[in-house]
Image: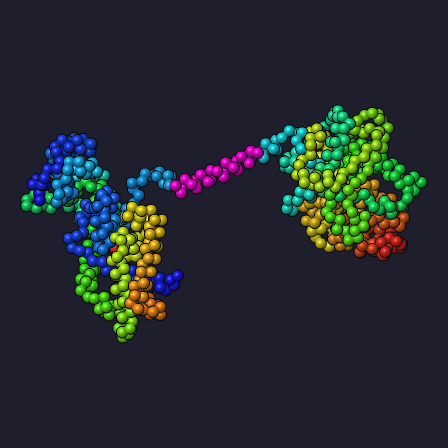
Amino acid sequence: MSPDRAPQFVSIETARQLLARAGVPADWNLTPEQFRTALQRSASRRFVGSPPDSKSVESYLGTLNVSDLALACACSIGNAAAWDFFVAKFRPELYRAARAIAGESSGRELADSLYAELYGLRESGGERKSLFDYFHGRSKLTTWLRAILSQRHVDEIRRARRTEPLEDNDREDSSETAVARNGTAEGLLDPERRKYLAILQATLTLVLDALAPRDRLRLAYYYVEELALAEIGKLLGEHEATVSRKLERTRRDLRSQIDAALRERKLSDAQLQLCYEYAREEWPFDLTLRLRSISPRSVDSGPAG
Amino acid sequence: MASREENEAVTGLLRRSLARDAAVPGDCPEPEFLAAYFEHSLDAAETALYDRHFSGCSRCRAQLAAMVRADVPKTQSRSAWLLDWRLLTAAAAVMLLVTVWLVRKSERANLASQPANAPLVAVANEEPKNGSPASPAADRITAVPQAAPETAKKVQPAPTAPAPRPLTRDQERKDEKKAARQFADSNSLEVQAPPNRVQSAAPSNGQTIEQDRRLKQQDSPTSHSMAVGALSQRAQAGHAGAQQQQIPAASQMVMVQPSPAPTQSASGASQSAPVRERRVSPPSPPASTAAPASVGGQAIGAATETVTVTNAEISDDKQEKSQPLTSAYSASDQGAMLQVLTESSVVKVIDTPIPSIKWRITAAGFVERSEDGGATWKGQEPDPDAHLVAGSAPTDKVCWLVGGEGIVFVTKDATNWKKIPPPVSADLTAVSAKSASAATVTTADGRRFSTHNEGKKWKPEN
């Protein structure tokens, strides 16, 4: 639904007040009507489905980064002064973030392509389309730019490493088949081994699915993305000591749940030991490839693929 | 507890399982929401929604991981690190330590700059310390404010004789007693009532032993018990050397060292028992009899004065060992004492087979022993009347001493001295000992005599 047809959540007076609060320079030539359009677009995306009350809208509008939104709006319109301001203030950060995410050379290319899209070199239906149109003020402009860079970079990696097919394959195969396919030659020859590995994998999947989203997220950040505790804490809004403590607790609970689930399958202690032993032998070799295929951290500085 | 191998297995399992999380097409949020989630600007419902999605979406997790890695603390100001609690805590701790150090330093400086009537600790000899700090019992004494040993070296003797302080007789006695005890404690002097008195030779002039001793005390300034007052007298006289000094027995101080347990001596006889009590009867001075005894050097009154230090007092004093002397002396007195004591040079150092153990004889007639190679010395006095000049120590416990008028002493336990009958009543200038019973002495005119039975019998060598 286009902003024009969407319910009008934002009045012109509200837009005028917010524009004044943004402290927009006069040479940006940003009118309240233009700004109201941007605000309306933002609110529409927020309150998709159910029309909100005025208080909710007012509260929501109060959380917006109106200065950045006004800049984005002015740049989207094509105001030269606003664009000069963006170049002076945000371009260095854009390129720095790109280099931090994708490396020196890949980062520059990434930033260049994004820079062009932000400027509005793309046209759609005869209209100049700028990426700024997709900025709605719910975050800072720099964070939004970094999110775009990250998304493009990860997608590029996944495309280059062809990890998409892995997900499809895993979804189709059963756990046991996957183990049989990915196992070593020795494992393939040992039916008992494959059986224990399959049982263990299935048990772990069940236990993981039962985890709280944040606990699972914490584990994934730590074991798959290999983030530091401080980084995980930044993402989850927790102190790194809290992250460490919760990780340890989750892991401990996980282990006890796995053992309990395996014992419910009538596995003896010796068989339990075998399960873990086979897992340790089997998957460390396999997992290294998986980690490289998924984690952007290990991406070389050069262009992928 | 899970074994290490099992933990490794679980780690591998976790990685594998979580890495297989698939991205659900169409469910991944746009960068706008990703950015808002990253900044925690979404409301609780939205946050929970995206938590659920991200926990199962490897693509979104990878994007968020890339964002956090690229995140720099650019929002912090250049000086924001200064507000880090860890840095502040460390800085506070450092400041506290520095403050404490400065306070202590100023306290020490205040103590060093205390006025002259600050507590005095008497000086025996000045010799460079070459070892670890002495124990309180073995502390060398310095005639300067106790708290500032470094200023001891700077104290200059008084150029003129100080005016005597008018003290009442009782006050004098109290001061003398206290000073004597504290002097003995700080100097670790061990003064024994020479049990050898009994064994000593009878006075040659027919006088009783007591009379003889008194006369000698009058004539001889080497009485250890006259330390403080005598030294003050010397200071007044301005004599550099102490050997010829005629010092009236003005202040008869009782220097009693609460020596270690009598078990030091194997014999356990009265000889080995440290002196706990000593009667001192200062002779009547020829001058004014009514003049009160004064630490400034004036003659003590004619009345016999008995100074007795009991064991209890000794033990009490020992506990107060660290307490400085009361300010019974003026600054000029103290300076004079320091000068005299400093000028009381060592006559002879006697080595033993053990390098760390040494003996020495001072010009004042004291015998001192060190167990730490000369860093600290413990004083002894075989005989207050003895004028000792030489010694020989064949072992760390055995030491022979010789001196004027045929004086010969020997100790077998480094504590108790026994007077040996001399071969001749001549000044002895050297001794060479082989054991506690065998030694060879040399007279001033070169004659040599040896004994193998602790002086019971002497045999001329040349």
Please state the horizontal and vertical placement of residue B435, each as a whole percent of the image. Answer: 80, 56
Magenta highlight on residue A89: no
Number of dots carrying numbers: 0
Which residues, given as a range, are shown in magenta? Answer: B85-107
Q: Left of B142 or right of it: where is A117?
A: left
What residue lies at 77% left-to-right and 51% top-to-bottom?
A: B265
Please state the horizontal and vertical placement of residue A89, each as a whole percent of the image. Answer: 23, 39
Residue with the most extreme left position: A125
What residue lies at 19% left-to-right and 62% top-to-bottom?
A: A171
The prevailing secondary structure element of the residues shown in magenta is helix
What residue lies at 17% left-to-right and 38% top-to-bottom?
A: A56
Q: Quadrant of residue B78?
A: top left
Q: Quadrant of residue A91?
A: top left
Magenta highlight on residue B104: yes
Residue with the most extreme right position: B206
Is A210 rendered above or below residue B220?
below
Of the pair A303 and A297, the residue shown nearer to us: A297
Of the pair B230 and A252, the residue shown nearer to us: A252
Q: Left of B436 or right of it: where is B143?
A: left
Is B87 rendered above or below residue A152?
above
Of the pair B160 and B34, the residue shown nearer to us: B34
Residue with the most extreme bottom position: A189
Please state the horizontal and vertical placement of residue A52, each as a whole percent of the image. Answer: 14, 40
**Res. B17 visible in picture:** no
* Quarter of the image where the C terminus of chain B is located: bottom right
